Amino acid sequence: MSDTEDVKFSLSVLVNKQRTKVLYAEIDSDFADIILSFLSLPLGTIVRILGKHYGDESPVVGSLTNLYNSLSNLNSDLFCTESCKQMLLNPRKSFENERSKLKLYVDDTPLTKGFECANKDCSYKGTQLGFYYDTSKCDCRNTLSNEVALDHYEETGGVYTKNTKTFIISDDLQIFPSETGYILRILTGLGITSTDFTELMDVTFGFNQVMDLLKGSLLSKTPLTDIILNKGVLNSIAVKCEPCILPVDQAVEKSSSNDKKMTVRAIIQESTNRLLFVEADGNFVDFLFSLLTIPLGKVECLLGSSTRLKNIDNLYRSLGNITDDKYLKTDTKTMLLEPRLPTGYVSKDNILPLIEETSKWGGYYIKSPKGLGNYVKGQKTYMVTNDLTVTPFYMASIISIFNQLKVPFSDVKELELDIGLKEALKILKASLTSTSALSNGLMIKRTAKKIPKQEHA
């Protein structure tokens, strides 16, 4: 997948005497950077690279896998520009320079490209720059298609950590500086009181093991044990989802005064109050697809580091708890704990409090391939099923769903639902672990506003 596939890392791993449990692994700063880089990966990138690496055995990541696959299957004509779909299928990450410095990286998304006007006599030449794809239009109406070199500069030293330091990582992905106090805390927390009960192992990690670790960080309670001691890894997330109560990050809470609302028409089985699907316009579909562009670290920030992805929660919180600046580079926490989206990625009507990074090319007026609007065309009606499969709304597909679910027409009601910031966050949270993201993210009340059935002559 990357030109770093042959890189190997040596880990010193402490296991219990029975070799049934990894207690912790000691890692150098290069390997710590790789683990921390998981927080920089957009959700859509995670789904894509897992699918590419594991093929038919690729894990199901909540409802995000269905969301990504349905995006892939949609006709490009449904998007505002021809490049919008590609931006969502291959989401960029901010701070691209850091990725290129990793000793091994799992994200094969191409680095950002810049394009100037193809008209050599253009009066705007040198002032307007297209990003990502050569499809944006210059103000002179020609295409910005001449590639220009962008300065992907590299600093010396580590990526997120300082390269003279070592770290320890627990089986559930808590990361700590390699100090006696932290080691004792891990061991005593596991009930280990003496070295008589432990054993050291030397383990080699390469590209495949790092991919297994990414997969295990999402699926397993004990990813290091699964990989190092061959205990196996699940192929889908199975987390019982109750109606979401969010410990929302304070910064997000302050923005809850955002009065933006999306309205959908929910189709409900009346006898069970089960959500079958929703009819939605482009704004709601745009919101769903934009979830694929959000990096894991931002998801953690939005959800108050309580995502139900326990290993990622642990990694995020433990990174935040490293306060001594001798271990981390200056901007590490900003990049990973409160990441921004790349230039041009936040939709005009986006309901989530997402912020784009400041452009590094201040002398240019930046032209995003999606223009200044959204990703999908708003005038189209879409059907979104409980597992976030998105398709254009056609009557034939509606009849097919009723037949498949064995729901008689007489047992169906329509409810109009308003979705604001809180509901959007609940859908985001449910999408990570549940294959019923809509019903787990939204609490359908029997008292919700019912749409009167149309009387037919």
Image (tube, rainbow, N blue to C red):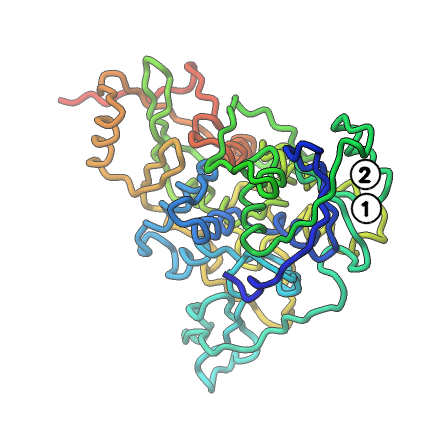
Q: What element carries label 1?
A: loop
Q: Which mark is residue 127?
A: none
| Residue carrying label 1 | 178
Image location (x, y in percent) of residue 299: 60, 41
Q: Quadrant of residue 33?
A: bottom right
- 56 vs 413: above or below: below
Q: Which residue is drawn at 53% across and 72% down?
A: 114
Q: Are marks 2 and 1 in contact (CB under 8 Å)?
A: yes
- Distance, label 2 to label 1, CA atoms, is 7 Å
* Amino acid type indicated by mark 1: Ser
**Does residue 305 show up?**
no
Q: In terms of sequence position, does the residue under pointer 2 or pointer 1 come before the other?
A: 1
**Quadrant including the C terminus:** top left
- 15 vs 3: above or below: above
Q: Looking at the image, which is closer to me, 9 or 407?
A: 9
- 428 vs 89: above or below: above
Image location (x, y in percent) of residue 364: 59, 72
Image location (x, y in percent) of residue 100: 62, 65
Q: Residue at x 71, y 57 (%)?
A: 30
| Residue carrying label 2 | 183
